[in-house]
Image (cartoon, helix red, strand yellow):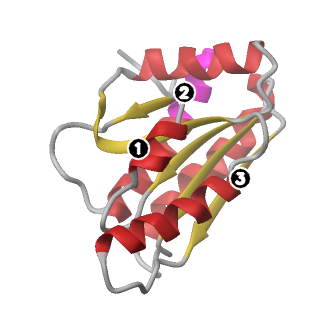
């Protein structure tokens, strides 16, 4: 199974990009130990449409087209459910053990995700009730994927 993160918007040079790169590199190194076949990190340009609804619809088409066939899509949205890192890791482990080909997190643009993406997702998760900048959500998503792999492999990174 491959782990993926797809996001609308491109991170500019700076601390957020460096943190995502650091966690993604750790994830790539640790993923094989967890029985995963690899990772995919993809960024897409924001829509330039005039209305928020049109932007969300255009971005939804881009995100949904980027999800591999048969992959489990997880939408990251402030209206989603909050779960702990252990439960998140368990979800990844269950998908891996069931032979699901991919486990993909989706981050929308500044206007958020369309209902179409949330409906297509197997689950909608939130990093809390507060609204987070998309750059930080990308960092948190990369870190949580890495943390989940360390939980699955028994690595001491995750301490309770």
Q: Which residue is mark 1?
A: 76
Indicate whether 5 appears above or below 59.
above
- Element class at badge 2: helix
State the CA–CA distance, disc 1 to disc 3. Answer: 17 Å
Image quarter hosting the N terminus: top right
Q: Tell me the CA gap for discs 2 and 1.
A: 16 Å
Q: Nearer the viewer, residue 36 or 74?
A: 74
Q: Name the N-terminal-most of marks 1 and 3.
A: 3
Q: Is residue 151 magenta?
A: yes
- Furthest residue toward left: 130
Check disc 2 and report the residue beneath it: 148
Closer to the chain start, of discs 2 and 3, is 3
Of mark 2 and mark 1, the one earlier in the sequence is: 1
- Mark 1 closeness class: few <14, some 14–19, many ≥20 residues within 10 Å: many
The vertical placement of 25 against 160, above or below, is below
Location of mark 3 (residue): 40
Residue occupying the point 46% across, 77% down: 46
- The image quadrant where one finds the C terminus is top left
CA–CA distance in space, label 2 to label 3? 16 Å
- Answer few, some or many: residues within 10 Å of disc 2's Cα (few below 14, many 20 plus, some between 14 and 19): many
Q: Residue at x 15, y 46 (%)?
A: 130
Numbered label tally? 3
Residue 34 to residue 133: above or below: above
Could you tell me if residue 15 is visible in this image? no
Pick the front one: 18 or 87: 87
Q: Is residue 145 a member of the stretch shown in magenta?
A: no
Q: Are marks 2 and 1 in contact (CB under 8 Å)?
A: no
* Magenta residues, start to end: 146-155
Question: What secondary structure is marked by label 3?
Answer: strand
Q: Quadrant of residue 32?
A: top right
Q: Please give the name of the residue rendered at 45% of the width and 16% of the height, measured from the top-left corner.
A: 86
């Amino acid at each position: 199974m491959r782990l993926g993160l797809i996001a609308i918007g491109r991170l500019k040079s700076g601390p957020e990009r460096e943190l995502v790169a650091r966690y993604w590199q750790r994830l790539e190194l640790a993923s094989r130990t967890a029985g995963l076949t690899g990772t995919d990190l993809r960024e897409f340009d924001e829509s330039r449409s005039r209305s928020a609804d049109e932007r969300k619809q255009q971005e939804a088409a881009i995100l949904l087209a980027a999800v591999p066939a048969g992959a489990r899509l997880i939408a990251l949205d402030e209206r989603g459910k909050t779960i702990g890192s252990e439960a998140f890791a368990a979800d990844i482990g269950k998908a891996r053990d069931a032979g699901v080909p991919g486990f993909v997190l989706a981050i929308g643009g500044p206007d958020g995700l369309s209902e179409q993406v949330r409906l297509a997702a197997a689950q909608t998760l939130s990093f809390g009730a507060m609204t987070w900048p998309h750059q930080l959500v990308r960092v948190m998503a990369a870190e949580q994927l890495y943390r989940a792999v360390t939980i699955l492999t028994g690595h001491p990174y995750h301490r309770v």
